[in-house]
Image (spheres, rainbow, N blue to C red):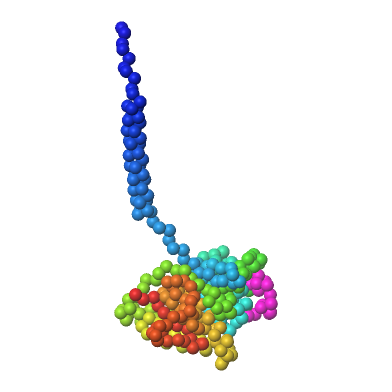
């Protein structure tokens, strides 16, 4: 059977077919793009954002030495005790290096055999009861009591001075923490100024009109200052602030340079401990650290408004309020 082949398509028909195919493909691309865009938007809406990294830093010669807020809080306590005892900054460096090695600067309730606390002190070696050692003020004073008995400790390498107190099975391990400890000791003893900063999540702010909550928070802040530094004059300064007079810490009364150093010591203590105290800003010597910015800057007042300026011996700690 003979069949007749269909007539060939004209060039014009072939061009029209190609156009229709291209239009179909274009529509498909648009649909695909819209679908992909929708998936991206959905992922952006449903994927949690990376959390803000909370950390504190101590700058030394251009290098930022980092600690977590919990570690910085304990570093602030240890160094405050050394300041209270009028010990040299070297003592704070040795103590911080020791605590970094022994507990990572965390007040833990476990350790090798019966070791506990910041310095992993042992009840069986006469450091005290577990309850006493777990009190960070007690354990810090116990460490400094031991360090005071080490002849010429300020001239010894950090690892030798620490080992003389701790009697560790790893006597060389403390050396690795020396530079970090020096940076933090310099800032927290006031030897260096505006070098301690913290980047923190926003504190749960107190209501500015909640007088009872503010009074409770001020009392807790005052108690923390006294716990770490001793019975300093701490006075209320409005509903959300306290002012601390550090002159009583000075071993050289009337020396403004010494007093200013002590003011910076307490101010940078206020930054390092802000995570636990709820402090939102710290004012000292015309400088202010703000929890919102996380940095030090010149204090700003406009047309006589704002907080009154402080003298060289005073530090203002202000709670975060809304």
Q: Is residue 159 magenta?
A: yes
Residue 56 vs 240, above or below: the answer is: above
Which residue is found at the position 60% from the left and 82% from the top? 87
Q: Toward the viewer: 85 or 234?
A: 234
Tell me: 135 left or right of 21: right
Indicate the quadrant where residue 254 lies.
bottom right
Q: Position of residue 310 (x, y in %)?
A: 47, 87
In this view, which residue lies farthest toward the top?
Answer: 1
Horizontal side, residue 29 vs residue 107: left or right = left
Q: Nearer the viewer, residue 86 or 316?
A: 316
Would residue 114 be seen by someone viewing this image from the given angle?
no
- The quarter of the image holding the C terminus is bottom left
Identity of the residue drawn at 41% across and 79% down: 318
Dominant SS in magenta: helix
- Image quadrant in which the N terminus is located: top left
- Residue pictured at 58% horizontal, 84% vertical: 86
Query: Which residue shows up at 45% across the image and 83% down it?
Result: 316
Q: Please determine whether, in this image, residue 94 is positioned above or below residue 3.
A: below
The one of 104 and 271 positioned closer to us in this rendering: 271
User: Residue 21 location, x and y as percent?
Assistant: 34, 33
26 lies left or right of 90: left
Image check: 225 left or right of 240?
right
Residue 189: image quadrant is bottom right
Q: Which residues are magenta?
A: 148-162
Q: Is residue 60 visible?
A: yes
Residue 20, image x, y percentages: 32, 33
């Amino acid at each position: 059977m003979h069949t007749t082949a269909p007539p060939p398509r004209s060039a014009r028909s072939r061009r029209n077919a190609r156009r229709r195919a291209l239009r179909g493909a274009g529509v498909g691309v648009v649909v695909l793009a819209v679908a992909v865009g929708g998936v991206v938007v959905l992922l952006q809406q449903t994927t949690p954002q990376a959390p803000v990294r909370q950390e504190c830093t101590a700058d030394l010669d251009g290098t930022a030495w980092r600690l977590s807020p919990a570690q910085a809080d304990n570093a602030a306590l240890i160094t405050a005790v050394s300041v209270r005892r009028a010990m040299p900054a070297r003592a704070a460096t040795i103590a911080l290096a020791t605590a970094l090695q022994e507990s990572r600067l965390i007040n833990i309730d476990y350790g090798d055999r019966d070791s506990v606390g910041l310095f992993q002190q042992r009840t069986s070696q006469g450091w005290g009861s577990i309850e006493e050692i777990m009190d960070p003020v007690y354990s810090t004073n116990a460490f400094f009591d031991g360090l005071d008995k080490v002849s010429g400790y300020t001239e010894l390498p950090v690892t030798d001075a620490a080992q003389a107190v701790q009697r560790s099975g790893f006597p060389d391990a403390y050396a690795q923490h020396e530079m970090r400890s020096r940076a933090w000791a310099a800032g927290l003893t006031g030897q260096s100024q505006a070098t301690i900063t913290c980047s923190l999540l926003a504190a749960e702010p107190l209501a500015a009109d909640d007088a009872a909550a503010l009074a409770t928070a001020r009392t807790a802040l005052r108690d923390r200052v006294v716990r770490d530094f001793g019975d300093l004059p701490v006075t209320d300064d409005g509903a959300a602030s306290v002012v601390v007079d550090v002159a009583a810490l000075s071993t050289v009364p009337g020396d403004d340079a010494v007093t200013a150093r002590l003011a910076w010591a307490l101010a940078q203590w206020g930054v390092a401990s802000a995570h636990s105290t709820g402090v939102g800003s710290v004012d000292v010597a015309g400088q202010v650290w703000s929890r919102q910015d996380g940095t030090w800057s010149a204090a700003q007042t406009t047309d006589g408004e704002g907080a009154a300026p402080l003298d060289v011996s005073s530090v203002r700690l202000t709670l975060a309020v809304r």
